[in-house]
Structure formats: structure tokens, C-alpha cells
Amino acid sequence: MTRRWICLLLAVLTMLTCTACGEEEAPGDVALGYDDPYLYTQIGGVLHRISPHSASVTPVCPDPLCKHEDETCPFYGVESIQFAGQYLYYLKMSRNWDGTSALCRFDLKNGTFRELYRPEAGTLSNFYAGEDYVFLNLGGVDEEWNNYYHILRFDPDTGEAVQLTKEPLQESQTPLLIENGRVYWSGDGHYSTDLEYQDRKDGDRGYSPNVTRKDHVYELESGEIKGEEGYKQMCFRVVRVDVKTGERVTVTEDAASAPILYEDRVIYGKLEKLRYLGKVYDEETDSWKEQYDKYGGKLYICNSDGTGERVLCDLGDAPYAFTVSHGILGGKTGVGDWIALWVFHYVPADENDPEKVKRAENAYLLVNVKTGEWKVAERETRS
Ligand SMILES: [Zn+2]
């Protein structure tokens, strides 16, 4: 497997929930119970928010003296986030490789932070926060260096964590949804259980709110390998499934980036005529190599059934390039008419040679889904 493929796979796996049958689910925005005007991302492990209104990227941490550089910052080491009502839940992971982790909650309304639960041993992962409970995995390593997992149920009101599994599980199990007293899981197959992790019903499939829009869920399937020499990659087939009737509609076969679901639209990059970005220094060969953008600087949009596909925005000669994933956390991809995407930003690397460029800090491109207008959110720096 080439490094390019591994990178692509890792990027997509971080974005998507893999399902047992090899399908993957597409990410998208979440129906929030609280109207929060920001989008969230992590930069260097620190949780930031993006304001489409002011086109700025700022740390969520409200402490004016904090440098957000180590564990003492409550928003450092953020691994995954989920919105639930007025709260933003997240796992805060130690970066010291000691495996310690904590479940935390940020109150979007009041701007307050709470560390809810920190296990004495083991590492937290795969959580879902419902109205009353948070379900998570607590992982560990046995004497023979095998990973094992227990399922935990945490009650944010009482602070009580209950271990629901007696025997350790060999695989982690991802809670996708809590609905009508049932928890829907993906792990060793799709199944549901009651709130005690009992009464298991195999094949009872639930979908994460991240991939659900009204009565439809979106799945990603592997498509054909396409693209120009040196830039070939697997395309994704985006399939819309009607939850009630099971009807499946192919939205597109040509998505070459993880699609963004925003309201009833699907947004993605396709493999286009290569767009020249400049020469980038390659350490391995100690030479300057021509760098191209396989997406041609274009982003496409279509209706939820695949009709009405058109170019949403065209970056033209701008020094930005789309990536395979969009880098926005918690499944929330837009605010108002604006979505945000993580893009590579290329800046001059040699003042004597304008062709030589290098990757700058990541930038966030804000795109108006109605007009295609775009702007770049800048990171605010404190003096
Ligand atoms: Zn901080």
C-alpha cells in the first residue's frame, strides 16, 4: 500500500463510521437543540471554533492567560466531539502516551467547562451522548498485550459510571444512537440493546444523527478507481437510503472527497483536470516537485437525490486546495448559508523563485451554499 493510499484511508476513516459490511457512512451536519453560530475543529489537538460570520478561527478556551499548549488547558487533546442540546461533549486524551482520558462537556450557552468523568485506569473511546446517558467504551490491555473493552454508561446528572459488560469484549463497540430506550450499536455487526446493554437484537440497525437528514440516511460505498496518472484514487458512491421504505438512490458515483451533507444538499469534490499549484520541496529526493490539485479547485453540489449537480465554487488560481476530508468536528458542517472546509494553503517558499511554494498552516474555506461565494477564515493571533 502506498503512502498516498494509507493517508487517504486514514483521513476517510477518521471522518466516517465504518459499518460491518464494508460500507461507510457519510458525515454531515447535526440537528442541534441549541442554536450555536460556530463550527468546530481541532488544530494541533486544541479545540477551535470557526465563525462564518466574522471569518475567524479562535480557541474555544476562554482563559485569556492560557496558551493551550499542554494538558492543563481544558481544550487540549480533544479527540472527538458530539453536540447534544446546549452541550458539546468531547473526549480529552493525554498526549503523554500514558493512555489517560476524560469525558468532558462544554456548555455552549454559558461558556462553562466540566470534566465529567476520568477513569482510574483504561482509555475512553467511542462515545455517544443522549439526553440522559452517555455510552462509552473503556479500553485496556491484558497481560498478553491484547486490547479489551468494557461498555460504560455514564449519568451526567449523578456523575455515576456503570460498567455494563461483565466479560471484556475483544472489539470496541460504537454507540450510534439512543432512541425509545434502545441503544443502537455498530461493532461486531449492527444491533440494538436496552440501556443495560442487555436484550440484544442483532441486525437492528440504527444510524448516527451525523448521517441522517429527515427520513434519509446517507451511506458511502467504495467506487471505481479514477483520476490522472500519479493522482489516481478510489471514488465514493454516495447512496441515499429511505429509512421507512428502504429505497436506495445513488446520489453520485464520482465523489472523490468525503461528502458534506448540509441540509438537503450533498457537496463533494470530483477528480478534475489537474490544477498546478507550484513546486514543493520533497525531502526524500531532495528536489522540488511539481504539485497539482486533483480536484481542479472545484467543489460540486447536488440535491439529495443526485439531481441538479453543478459546480458550487471554483477556486481559480487561489493558493488553496481541497482535501479528502473537510476537518470539521461533530458532524456540524454549516451555519446559515455557510459551510466550512479545511483546505491546504500554499505560500511562497523562495522570494527569488515564485514557483516554489510550501504548505502553510491549514486554512478554513467558508463557502456560501446558495451563491458559491467564498472567503478564508483566518486564525486570530493574540498579541
Ligand atoms: Zn486553554
Image: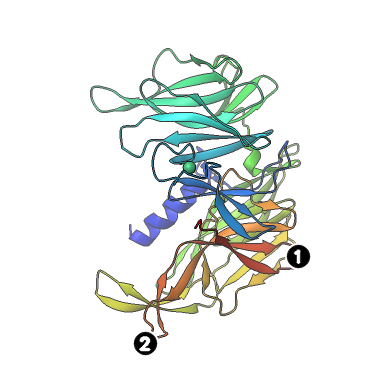
* Element at label 1: loop
- For mark 2, what is the residue? 352
Q: Quick one: quadrant of the N terminus?
A: bottom left
Along the line of sight, which residue is nearer the eye, 147 or 110?
110
Q: Quadrant of residue 307?
A: bottom right
Q: Report x, y in % for residue 187.
A: 48, 31
- For mark 1, what is the residue? 308
Q: Nearer the viewer, mark 1 or mark 2?
A: 2
Q: Report x, y in % for residue 380.
A: 54, 58
Left or right: residue 142 versus residue 57 is left
Along the line of sight, which residue is nearer the eye, 288 or 192?
288
Q: As displayed, is residue 241 above or below residue 178?
A: below
**N-term mark: 1 or 2:** 1
Image point (64%, 62%), residue name: 366
Q: Report x, y in % for residue 137.
A: 46, 26
Image point (71%, 41%), residue name: 31
What separation in Å lies between label 1 and label 2 (alpha carbons)?
46 Å
Label 1: how many residues lie within 10 Å, few (<14), some (14-19) or many (20+)?
few
Left or right: residue 185 versus residue 211 is left
Q: As displayed, is residue 24 above or below residue 223?
A: above
**Amino acid type assigned to the residue bearing label 2 in the image:** Asn
Circle on res. 179: none
Image point (31%, 37%), residue name: 97
Left or right: residue 165 versus residue 375 is left
**Amino acid type assigned to the residue bearing label 1 in the image:** Gly
* Element at label 2: loop
Q: Report x, y in % for residue 283.
A: 27, 69
